[in-house]
Image (spheres, rainbow, N blue to C red):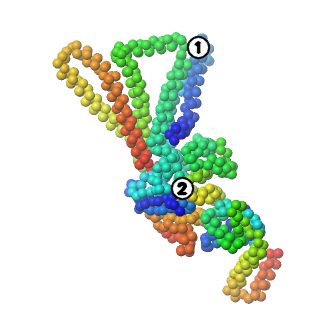
């Protein structure tokens, strides 16, 4: 198993607050990893650093052995919390856009998923609800054959049906050599799909272990353990 | 599509094994049926594909499921094996039930009269 | 990848510019027809006046839109939520700046060309073209009188200066927006402040350079042993001669240096200091 992500003593400061504090983590290929922590614990900061949207103040990071840059952006597929697609585009425009810039983009897969969702590709994003826009983004992101997927709060604030759709899409579309990082504070919802759990608290790594091991050692669910670790 | 009920008390793969066994016993999956792919099953049950794979390995070890390298994964055609599974499965449930009754201090006759009463009502 | 960025940038902006250009040209043609009719009836006169007004308005709109779109595309596409999409594409930050700059330049030139074209379409009668030619000839004559056989060089240098000046102005706005992005809050106000700040600094530097330069030139004249009434005339000649040999080349170089500085600042901020909200 080769390493897909390696963070070495990462620190990121915003003014007087330390968003990441000496954070080290090593992830292997072929895992679904939960990046778990309450709001403001540094999840998004870490994901932004992986995607080259932030530069750390100290420490090192490599993705498949490379520092964040053009080459890593080719192999990392990122779903931010934001709705980032330009409103004036048609759904089909966004697909062409992804196809143009990402060599690993599978157009057919994207259209299949849109079809299953009963979504007309000639519709403009402006005319879609926020929930549907988020689904389009998820379809685009999961239609890439990436090595590393970073999904930032993909199930925050969605109804159970949408949540099931999202988790289903994730499970069906990732392949065995890829690793998926899912950041969330809603652990119970995704616990069963995780291989590994990473707990992050105030920018520090609290725990990184296989989910099975946590079950066996602690004899409790990740959700229960999470509530204990992060009790106020 | 069958419903999958998962809780957090037991390891997930064991729950999956039990539920697939239950589906075989109930005839949802018939002898010789082809199973969906691990990924599809995982997506249905909303579990990690590796967990589903582990459940499959478990089922294969018991001989309930076998893999054909080219054609996929099948439920066993060995009806005797399924019958044995059914017996074992039911025996376990009844034994659990009897243990509980015993804890409550109920004797054989009490249990039978309860069973009669309840089954009459439900008919 | 730069080509793809330019293509998408072009697509994103063409949907605004092309209809605008089309309206401008249509209005100019309508006006031309109106102009060609003698003795317009009263209602037609009203229509003509209205369409002239609309035409003038469309020119103003095109100029404003060219400017606003340049700013908006840079800010919204790169530094608002859409930045999450753009900055995770496998391209270098510098390619974002260059693609935006190139497409902006295309629309700048495009707007100028379409305005000229529409004027020509509207007013380009034989008589008008003749008088236009006369005006241009007069201009050329004046240039030749002032600069002698260097008038061609003056025109070329002026054209280059206009071009690099536009590039510099755009890059200055980009740099201001990028500097505004360094603030955690009130980024728009920060951008304005940065723009005013840069402007002040550049004004100061160029004033200082001008002062030093004119001092040197003047002192050379003053200490000339042949200083006389005659030399007064010669000095004005030498100032005119300085235009193609010194003033324009220096302005062009200064503008290019400024452009490079703005580009480097913007690129540095994108690379090291990006912090999308």
Residue A182 image point, x, y percent: 55, 59
> What residue is at 59 percent from the left and 13 percent from the top?
C36
> What residue is at 34 percent from the left and 17 percent from the top?
C147
The residue tagged 2 is A148
Residue A152 image point, x, y percent: 53, 56
Q: Is residue B98 left or right of residue C60?
A: right
Q: Mark 2 belongs to which subunit? A: A
Alpha-carbon neighbours of circle 1 within 10 Å: few (<14), some, or many (≥20)?
Answer: few
Q: Is residue B98 above or below residue C92?
A: below
Check contact, mark 2 vs mark 1: CB within 8 A: no
Tell me the element at label 2: strand
Q: Is residue A77 above or below residue B109?
A: above
Tell me the element at label 1: helix
Q: Nearer the viewer, mark 2 or mark 1?
A: 2
> What residue is at 37 percent from the left and 21 percent from the top?
C154
Question: Which residue is situated farthest in the front direction here?
Answer: B69
Alpha-carbon neighbours of circle 2 within 10 Å: few (<14), some, or many (≥20)?
Answer: many
Q: Mark 1 belongs to which subunit? A: C
Tell me the distance, in whole angstroms, between the alpha carbons under discs 2 and 1.
68 Å
- Please name whichever residue, A63 or B111, is drawn nearer the observer in this view of the structure: A63
Whether callout 2 and callout 1 share a subunit is answered no
Residue C230 is marked as none
User: Residue B33 appears in which quarter of the rendering?
Assistant: bottom right
Residue C29 image point, x, y percent: 58, 20
Question: Which residue is situated farthest in the left direction here?
Answer: C225
- Please name whichever residue, B118 or C229, is drawn nearer the observer in this view of the structure: C229
User: Residue C156 appears in which quarter of the rendering?
Assistant: top left
Q: Is residue A52 left or right of residue B61?
A: left
The residue tagged 1 is C36
Residue C270 image point, x, y percent: 43, 45
> What residue is at 69 percent from the left and 66 percent from the top?
B67
Q: Is residue A230 shown to the viewer in this render? A: no
């Amino acid at each position: 198993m080769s390493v897909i992500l390696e963070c070495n003593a990462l620190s990121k400061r915003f003014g007087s607050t330390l968003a990441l504090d000496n954070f080290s983590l090593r992830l292997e290929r072929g895992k679904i990893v939960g990046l778990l922590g309450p709001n403001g614990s540094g999840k998004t900061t870490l994901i932004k650093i992986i995607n080259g949207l932030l530069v750390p103040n100290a420490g090192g990071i490599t993705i498949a052995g490379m520092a964040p840059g053009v080459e890593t952006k080719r192999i990392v597929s990122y779903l931010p919390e934001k709705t980032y697609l330009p409103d004036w585009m048609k759904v089909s425009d966004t697909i062409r856009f992804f196809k143009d810039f990402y060599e690993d983009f599978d157009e057919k897969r994207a259209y299949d998923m849109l079809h299953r969702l009963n979504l007309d590709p000639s519709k403009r994003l402006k005319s879609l609800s926020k929930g549907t826009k988020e689904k389009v983004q998820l379809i685009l992101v999961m239609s890439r054959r990436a090595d590393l997927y970073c999904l930032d709060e993909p199930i925050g604030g969605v109804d159970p049906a949408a949540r099931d759709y999202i988790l289903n899409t994730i499970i069906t579309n990732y392949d065995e050599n890829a690793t998926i990082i899912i950041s969330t504070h809603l652990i119970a919802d995704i616990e069963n799909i995780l291989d590994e759990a990473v707990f992050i608290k105030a920018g520090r790594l609290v725990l990184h272990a296989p989910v099975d091991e946590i079950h066996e050692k602690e004899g409790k669910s990740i959700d229960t353990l999470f509530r204990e670790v992060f009790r106020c | 599509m069958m419903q999958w009920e998962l809780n957090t008390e037991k390891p997930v793969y064991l729950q999956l094994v039990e539920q697939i066994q239950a589906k075989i016993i109930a005839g949802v999956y018939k002898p010789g049926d082809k199973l969906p792919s691990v990924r599809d099953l995982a997506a249905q049950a909303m579990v990690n594909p590796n967990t589903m794979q582990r459940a499959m390995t478990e089922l294969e070890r018991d001989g309930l499921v076998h893999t054909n390298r080219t054609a996929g994964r099948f439920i066993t055609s060995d009806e005797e094996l399924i019958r044995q599974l059914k017996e074992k499965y039911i025996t376990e449930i009844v034994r659990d039930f009897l243990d509980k009754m015993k804890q409550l201090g109920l004797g054989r006759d009490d249990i039978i009269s309860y069973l009669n009463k309840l089954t009459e009502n439900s008919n | 990848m730069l080509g793809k960025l330019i293509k998408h940038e072009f697509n994103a902006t063409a949907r605004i510019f092309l209809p605008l250009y089309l309206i401008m040209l249509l209005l100019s043609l309508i006006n031309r027809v109106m102009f060609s009719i003698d003795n317009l009836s009263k209602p037609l006169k009203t229509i003509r006046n209205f369409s002239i007004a609309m035409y003038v308005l469309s020119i103003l709109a095109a100029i404003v839109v060219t400017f606003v779109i340049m700013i908006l595309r840079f800010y919204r596409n790169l530094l608002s939520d859409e930045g999450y999409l753009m900055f995770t594409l496998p391209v270098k930050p510098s390619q974002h700046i260059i693609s935006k700059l190139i497409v902006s330049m295309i629309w700048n030139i495009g707007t100028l060309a379409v305005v000229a074209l529409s004027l020509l379409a509207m007013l380009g009668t034989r008589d008008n073209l003749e008088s236009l030619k006369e005006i241009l000839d007069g201009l050329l004559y004046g240039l030749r009188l002032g600069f002698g056989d260097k008038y061609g060089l003056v025109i070329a240098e002026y054209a280059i200066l206009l071009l690099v000046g536009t590039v510099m102005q755009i890059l200055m706005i980009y740099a201001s927006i990028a500097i505004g992005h360094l603030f955690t809050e009130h980024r728009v106000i920060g951008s304005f402040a940065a723009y005013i700040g840069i402007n002040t600094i550049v004004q100061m530097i160029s004033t200082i350079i001008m002062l030093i330069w004119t001092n040197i030139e003047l002192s050379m004249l003053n200490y000339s042993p042949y200083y006389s009434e005659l030399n007064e005339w010669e000095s004005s000649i030498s100032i005119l001669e300085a235009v193609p040999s010194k003033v324009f080349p220096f302005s062009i170089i200064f503008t290019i240096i400024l452009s490079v500085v703005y580009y480097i600042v913007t690129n540095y901020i994108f690379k090291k200091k990006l912090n999308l909200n």
